[in-house]
Image (cartoon, rainbow, N blue to C red):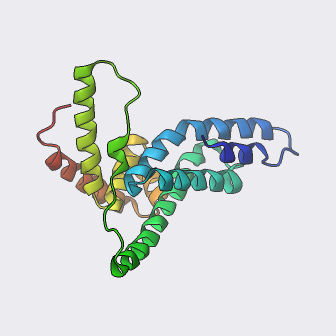
């Protein structure tokens, strides 16, 4: 799926010894983070193709510029790159949408999240409950402002601490705490009728 990032990471200066181990570690890291990063980008953009592009760009940038860094640094660095790409995408899409609306183009398109199929089907009742819960969570996450969404996903899905989240988002730790707290409060209100 992310062949370009893996090809790039495998071509990282193999002149030095130990680079092969570093390349394999980077490949493992990218393989481990790709699905969650894709979901984050997809929730932020609402578009599968744009999400794929954003994640692939972030992977390539990490491999090109930070592949030689310590493995423990890759997580926050990768998510900082990804969040930066998402913010850039928002800026570009705002400008495009202004022109599209002004010129009379379509305002709303179908949400691709509603067309995704769950490949693991344990049972009809569990599947239906899981789909309803996930649908409600996705809708609630999409209602959050971008910074709250980022803070919540990085802290909850990625398991980052406050410092790593602040580094990935490019803001202070206090801002992360504020965004995360507001996101949790809003999600509790929006998901009040849903049981886990």
Q: Residue drawn at (35%, 61%), measured in percent from left and top?
A: 147
Residue 36 falls left or right of residue 187: right
Image vertical order of residue 186 relative to residue 33, above or below: below
Q: Nearer the viewer, residue 144 or 50?
A: 50
Q: What x and y, as percent, mark residue 39?
A: 43, 45
Q: What x and y, as percent, mark residue 152?
A: 33, 50
Residue 67 falls left or right of residue 180: right
- The image quadrant that residue 1 belongs to is top right
Q: Residue furthest bottom?
A: 102
Q: Residue furthest top?
A: 123
Residue 5 falls left or right of residue 123: right
Image vertical order of residue 178 relative to residue 18, above or below: below
Q: Nearer the viewer, residue 88 or 13?
A: 88
**How many numbered discs, if any?**
0
Q: Nearer the viewer, residue 152 or 47?
A: 47
Q: What x and y, as percent, mark residue 132?
A: 22, 35
Image vertical order of residue 62 relative to residue 98, above or below: above
Q: Is residue 174 visible?
A: no
Q: What x and y, as percent, mark residue 99?
A: 40, 79
């Amino acid at each position: 799926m992310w062949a370009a990032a893996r090809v790039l990471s495998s071509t990282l200066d193999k002149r030095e010894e130990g680079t092969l181990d570093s390349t394999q570690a980077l490949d493992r890291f990218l393989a481990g983070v790709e699905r969650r990063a894709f979901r984050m980008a997809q929730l932020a953009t609402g578009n599968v193709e744009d999400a794929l592009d954003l994640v692939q760009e972030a992977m390539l940038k990490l491999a090109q510029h930070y592949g030689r860094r310590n493995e423990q640094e890759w997580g926050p660095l990768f998510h900082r790159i990804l969040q930066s790409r998402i913010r850039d995408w928002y800026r570009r899409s705002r400008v495009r949408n202004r022109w599209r609306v002004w010129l009379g183009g379509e305002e709303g398109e179908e949400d691709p999240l509603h067309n995704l199929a769950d490949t693991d089907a344990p049972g009809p009742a569990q599947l239906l409950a899981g789909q309803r819960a996930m649908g409600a969570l996705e809708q609630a996450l999409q209602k959050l402002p971008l910074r709250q969404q980022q803070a919540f996903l990085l802290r909850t899905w990625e398991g980052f601490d406050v410092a790593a989240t602040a580094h990935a988002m490019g803001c202070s730790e206090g801002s992360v705490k504020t965004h995360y707290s507001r996101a949790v409060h809003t999600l509790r209100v929006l998901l009040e009728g849903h049981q886990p």
